[in-house]
Amino acid sequence: MQYADLLIENHGKVAVIRLNRPKAMNALNDNMMNELGDALYKFDADPAVHVIILTGSEKVFAAGADIAAMANYTYADTYPGNYIGRNWEHILNIRKPVIGVVSGYALGGGCELAMMCDFLIAADSAKFGQPEIKVGVTPGAGGTQRLPRAIGKSKAMDMLLTARMIDAAEAERTGLVSRVFPADKIMEEALKIAESIAAMPVTVAMAIKDSVNRAYETTLTEGVRYERRYFHAAFGTPAQKEGMAAFLEKRPANFEGK
Ligand code: DAK
């Protein structure tokens, strides 16, 4: 796959998508978001890929929506044209696990895109922020909704209203990211994590992702009912037969192709 604003790497069952507009701090524009949707859908449909990593460069994940592109937009450009909605949220339709790996800045739309990943790993150089207020707009890709769910109302209000950035340590402490690694080791560690997930049965990984996401959309009772259906269905899969047989036979499970 060749793209103007993305770099693609294949690591066995792990596909890596890198945002790549170095001259504009990976600012997110229409072309990049169209390309990102295309790459994500292709990997989601590819049976050889089990896990997707979304990352940027060492210096920046993404510094937000492209301010140069949107500076002269009018309401008539954004609302009828469904700016953001038309191509920013393809990632939410992806059924395989998507790990966000953040080094350097993840600001504005960049932080919002990172929060659409299933979980985040950060380099110790990472900085997260929602500075939209400084450029005269509210967040538009879920920042006021996903940030409070991730880190709580007080921290989220603080970040959104003051535009202050938080570093990797604060992001980990508040639960925005799951783990932090030294910047020079981040991709190595991210690939290890992705490969450990890719070695699990992909059907179960997809069901877990779907069930966890359900927790944000429904009541506890309905969410548990939803989970229970997947649990029951698992007994009809080769993954359950292999996983439990391997445990009883005291050998590593081999989920190849299951
Ligand atoms: N857009 C366009 N270009 C950007 C950019 C951005 N968001 N961020 C950086 N750049 C460009 C700079 O203009 C500069 O370009 P040249 O001057 O070299 O041509 C180049 O990248 C390098 O940037 P700096 O010279 O500023 O580099 P520094 O290392 O000094 O600073 C920085 C890095 C990331 C701290 C700084 O660039 C910065 O503060 N960037 C802006 C961050 C920001 O405000 N992000 C939020 C953008 S607003 C909506 C939905 C969503 C949104 C809006 C509307 N609707 C539904 C309507 C989302 C909005 C946003 O994300």
Image (tube, helix red, strand yellow):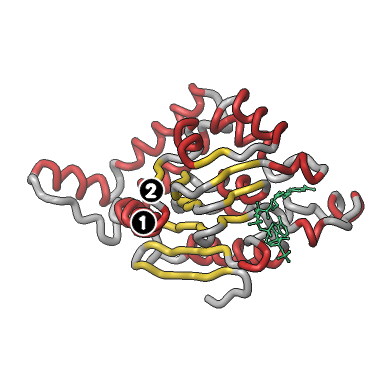
Q: Is residue 59 above or below residue 210?
A: below
Question: Residue at horizontal 48%, vertical 42%?
Answer: 168
Residue 181: assigned label: 2
Left or right of 63? Residue 57 is: left
Of the four image quadrants, the one with ligand 1 is bottom right
Q: Give the camera-side residue of 13 and 45.
A: 13
Residue at 54% x, 24% y is 219
Looking at the rendered structure, the secondary structure element under dot 2 is strand
Residue 135 screen position, x and y as percent: 79, 46
For residue 185, what is the image quadrant?
bottom left
The image shows residue 137, relative to residue 47, as above or below, that is: above
Reading the image, the residue beneath label 1 is 185
Q: Outermost residue, left direction?
A: 249
SS at mark 1 in the image:
helix
**Which amino acid is tagged 2?**
Phe
Is residue 232 among what the camera can see? yes
In which quadrant of the rendered image does the C terminus lie? Answer: bottom left
